[in-house]
């Protein structure tokens, strides 16, 4: 499932995959310039998640 998601992100131009022919095989993923435009969205979601966790912790 993870490989499928990574392939889709690569096809959409969000990440770049580099495979190093080492033993064991090494694969590296990096955000493309286009992918980096998602950083503010990801940060906003992380901030929301932090607020949600604080809210849940205060309800316990």
Image: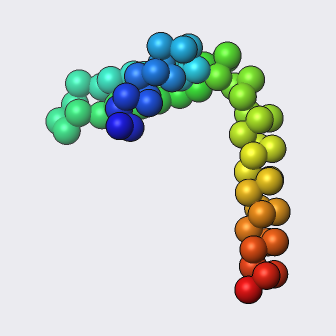
Q: Residue furthest front?
A: 59
Q: Residue furthest left?
A: 23
Location of the C terminus by quadrant is bottom right
In the image: residue 15, left or right of residue 22:
right
Q: Nearer the viewer, residue 28 or 55?
A: 55
Q: Residue at x 59, y 26 (%)?
A: 31
Q: Residue at x 19, y 38 (%)?
A: 24
Spot occupied by residue 57 in the image (x, y as percentages of width and height): 75, 79
Spot occupied by residue 12 in the image (x, y as percentages of width and height): 54, 14
Q: Residue at x 56, y 14 (%)?
A: 13
Q: Residue at x 64, y 22 (%)?
A: 35
In the image: residue 8, left or right of residue 49:
left
Q: In this rendering, is residue 27 above or below 18?
A: below
Q: In this rendering, is residue 26 above or below 20?
A: below
Residue 43, image quadrant: top right
Q: In this rendering, is residue 25 above or below 17?
A: below
Location of the N terminus by quadrant is top left
Spot occupied by residue 36 in the image (x, y as percentages of width and height): 69, 25
Q: Count the marks: how many?
A: 0
Q: Nearer the viewer, residue 41 or 60?
A: 60
In the image: residue 28, left or right of residue 54:
left
Query: What sort of colour scheme is used for the picture?
Result: rainbow
Residue 41, image quadrant: top right
């Amino acid at each position: 499932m993870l490989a499928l998601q990574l392939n889709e992100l690569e096809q959409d131009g969000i990440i770049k995959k580099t495979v190093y022919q080492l033993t064991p095989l090494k694969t590296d993923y990096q955000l493309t310039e286009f992918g980096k435009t998602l950083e503010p969205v990801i940060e906003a979601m992380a901030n929301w998640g932090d607020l949600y966790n604080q809210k849940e912790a205060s309800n316990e």
